[in-house]
Amino acid sequence: MPSVVRESTGPNGHTPPRAGSGCVPATRTGEGSLDVRADFPIFARRFDGRPLIYLDSGATSQKPAVVIDTVGEHLRAHNANVHRGVYALAREADAAYDGARRRVAELVGTEPRTTIFTKNVTEAINLVAYAWGRSNVGPGDAVLITQLEHHANIVPWQMLCRERGAMLRYLAVDARGELSLEQLDAELARGDVRLVAFSHVSNVLGTIVPVAEMTARIRAAGAVSLVDGAQAVPHMPVDVGALGADFYAWTGHKALGPTGIGVLHGRAELLEGMEPFMTGGDMIASVDFQSATWNELPYKFEAGTPPIAEAVGLGAAVEYLSALGMDRVRAHERALTAYMLERLAEVPGLRVVGPPEAERRGGLASFTIEGIHPHDIAELADRGGVCIRAGHHCAQPLMRRLGVGATARASVGVYNEPSDIDALVDALLAGREVFGLKP
Ligand SMILES: Cc1ncc(COP(=O)(O)O)c(C=O)c1O
């Protein structure tokens, strides 16, 4: 593998298609590796003359030109409010918004009717905690989550349990960063669990959680499952139906889409039986002086003017990902992750948390280096021109379980190349010298 940072090629003159047409990635290489960096205009930037080396896709992804231009084109030429105008421009806006929902549902093998647009995955989880949780969880019940959750999949359940007099219990993370199906069985056997909420892929450990095995057990026990797919949908094939999740939530900005748009997929019977989360325009069928009735799915859960341009941008993003092929995205990122694990092992004192095998994890590695604080690690990486994240990654209970205050985290996306990992490792090795640590 090359040990020098390869110059970013920058935009390749790729002409983005207009909204609604095919979003074909500019370049493709052989099986298992992608060469699409030229589709992402941000990589034309220089920082003190150096290219952008972005290893923070776990926080948010960079955006291909087709997404940026589709959003711009929508605002320039197709902008109107949705589901209320009878004129031609409004019909175009309706078609763009509804078309985006269709594409998003297709990406994960589900139906537009049960695909709800939210602001982000955090709002999607809160929607379930409020609209399902407040009517289905009561005193003596339990909600089960895991020690590897992001705060977005902890705090809504803490609030629900506190308000409803229910108990919040946790599945433990073992030394490899994995969950135990035996513990899940034991918890479910207690007979009080109403809902189990867990991540598909941990944003800290990288662990790929065995979703289908878990949802089968949860369904058999008469409980409901919610899966936080924020770190899964952008990186691997996801089929919500095959996974058997009752609720599956994810966030657009990590999946090459704009910020301000998230997605909740839900089982139709559950969504139909739920009260609305928020109320106001668009989620209404009729309003009288004292009462109101609700619109049909999915609009019942989309109060007020929705994030229209953001949804249209997400539609372009999923079309771009679909054209790449999620199998190829996963193969590319798995190979990069394997290479990252191999190269990080060359840094003395560096410890990666989570499963040691690349096939057991998503495209990220969180690590500590003996003698250097994680924030200093990120700072040293920045001196080498490499963007990584440091901190608790909104997973403070997991940090406590791991016995660390923070970690550094490098995470990959479709646009990364092995030379990015080389640049990170070079920066870390140089950084050890800055800290006076032995080579
Ligand atoms: C696993 C996981 N869940 C939830 C979130 C929250 O995402 P958002 O801020 O887009 O709602 C993140 C983002 O960091 C995440 O990694």
Image (cartoon, rainbow, N blue to C red):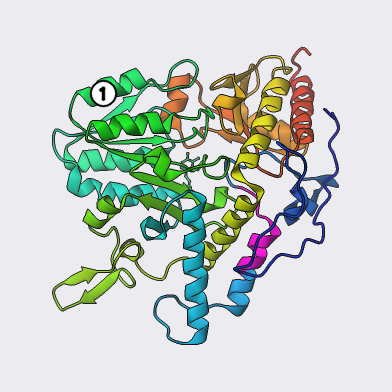
State which quarter of the image contains the N terminus.
Answer: top right
Tell me the quarter of the picture where residue 407 sits: top right
Q: Residue furthest bottom?
A: 87
Q: Is residue 81 left or right of residue 339?
A: left
- Using the image, determine if residue 204 lies above or below residue 236: above
Is 67 contained in the magenta span?
Answer: yes
Boundaries of the magenta span? 61-71
Give whichever of 351, 193 is nearer the camera.
193
- Around disc 1, counting alpha carbons within 10 Å, would you say few (fewer than 14), some (14 to 19), or many (20 or more)? some
Inspect the image, locate mark 1, and give the three-letter code of the amino acid beneath it.
Glu
Q: Secondary structure at mark 1?
A: helix
Q: Residue 403: x and y, percent?
A: 47, 19
Tell me the quarter of the picture where residue 165 sits: top left
Instruction: From the image, give the main secondary structure of the stretch colored magenta.
Output: helix
Taking the spot 71% from the left edge, 26% from the top edge, the residue there is: 339
Q: Is mark 1 within 8 Å of ligand 1?
A: no
Give whichever of 79, 24 is nearer the camera.
24
- Residue at the disc numbered 1: 187
Is 362 contained in the magenta span?
Answer: no
Taking the spot 54% from the left edge, 30% from the top edge, the residue there is: 206
